[in-house]
Amino acid sequence: MRVFYLCYVELDAKMGGTRHVLEVVKNLGLLGHHVELFAPQIKLPKPKLKNVRIVYVPTIRTRIAGWLLFYALSFFWLWFRGRKEPPDVIYAREMTYNLFVPLLSTLLGCPLIVEVNALILDEMKMFGEGKIKLALARFCQRHVLLLADRILAVSDGIKTGLVQAYGVPAGKIFVVPNGTDPEHFRPMDMVQCRREVGLDAQAPMVGFVGSCYPYHDVKCLIEAAPLVSKEFKDPRFVIVGDGSMRRVWMDVTEERQVSDLFFFAGAVPYEKVPYYMNAFTICVAPFTRKRNENSGLSPLKLYDYMACGKAVVSNQLQGLRDLIEGNRAGKLVPPEDPVSLAGAIVELLGDQGLREEMGRNGRALVEKQYTWEATTKRIVDLCSELFKERG
């Protein structure tokens, strides 16, 4: 199968979206398919992946103008390449305002698959976007999604949201959850990992790894910290990641007088992330109710935590109950409830046997069905079914 993969994701960014793109194209290549990945121009050398050709499309850093330039140039670039060597499918990671993709699919005579990782309108509202931008985004999304041959959503909540918001037929939306790399994220010795990343060898340690954005409720973790410190002497809370909320959360620790309990590591290289996860006694993933309750969740961090054999604490939100509670891989608490969050953390910090059992359960689950290879095989199977339907 020959795939044109189009995304507006910078391949040098320390973001979950970047990992998702690179893991899927890498595994497509390893499965014997040929991929041309079209992405925004960056300064770093192109990653070398088997059967994958990366094409950098020039753009500019100005936000909206940069998007439009990328959309236009990628359209002509893919059209030119497709006339010479037609793809079997165009696979596009959803881009809010890109109206060119369905036209490109029609001109090249190949099916279009659109991958959706969030309910964009909910995210835009959370970031305070105005009515004009919201209306434009709604128009563009509806246009692209209705014309796509297949839509891949990473959660059931996103599938439901697309049906309700745009009238997309449910029959052409397929849920394909995220995954992880169980060779990169694997159980390692805690003491050695703490030494590697410079963390206290003895302290009870609660860790979060992820982007510092409003839909991650680290504020709730900060409010839970004093309750945990009443039960355990000198616990440490480590926040790995960067984003618009990092400075805000640091200020909150000062206001709540718990800054001595917290360490904000910032963004760290991908190679170092498993060391941090294995340095933690338990891993947490608190989410806000807004945005996450509607869309459901398939967060990369949870699969990574479980692959490292760590018990996790997260929230009772769509997409997590079956994953975490159903497989006894951790504990879920109501979102935005610091007392319940603290209670779950205290319980797991005080029960090594339970932590280890949950860690083993999570690791086994990941190995069985949540690897990037398994995710990519689901995508390939859906492509095969689509080809049969189109004859």
Image (cartoon, rainbow, N blue to C red):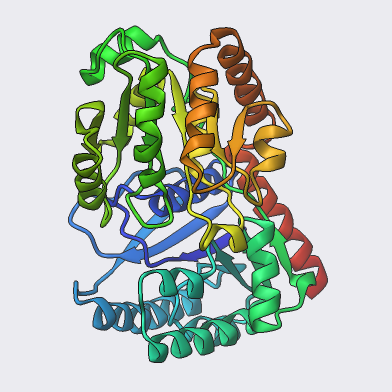
157 over 313 or under it: above or below: below
Q: In which quarter of the image is the C terminus?
A: bottom right
Query: Looking at the image, which is closer to me, 2 or 155?
Result: 155
Residue at left offset 23%, top offset 31%:
263
Q: In which quarter of the image is the N terminus?
A: bottom right
Residue at left offset 36%, top offset 46%:
219
Residue 58 image point, x, y percent? 24, 72
- On the rendered structure, is 184 left or right of 381? left
- On the rendered structure, is 302 left or right of 208? right
Residue 67 image point, x, y percent? 31, 78
Residue 389 image point, x, y percent? 82, 71
Query: Looking at the image, which is closer to me, 37 or 23?
Result: 23
Residue 345 image point, x, y percent? 49, 25
- Which quadrant of the structure image shows residue 329? top right
Query: Looking at the image, which is closer to me, 271 or 279?
Result: 279
Residue at left offset 45%, top offset 28%:
283
Query: Looking at the image, which is closer to me, 29 or 194?
Result: 194
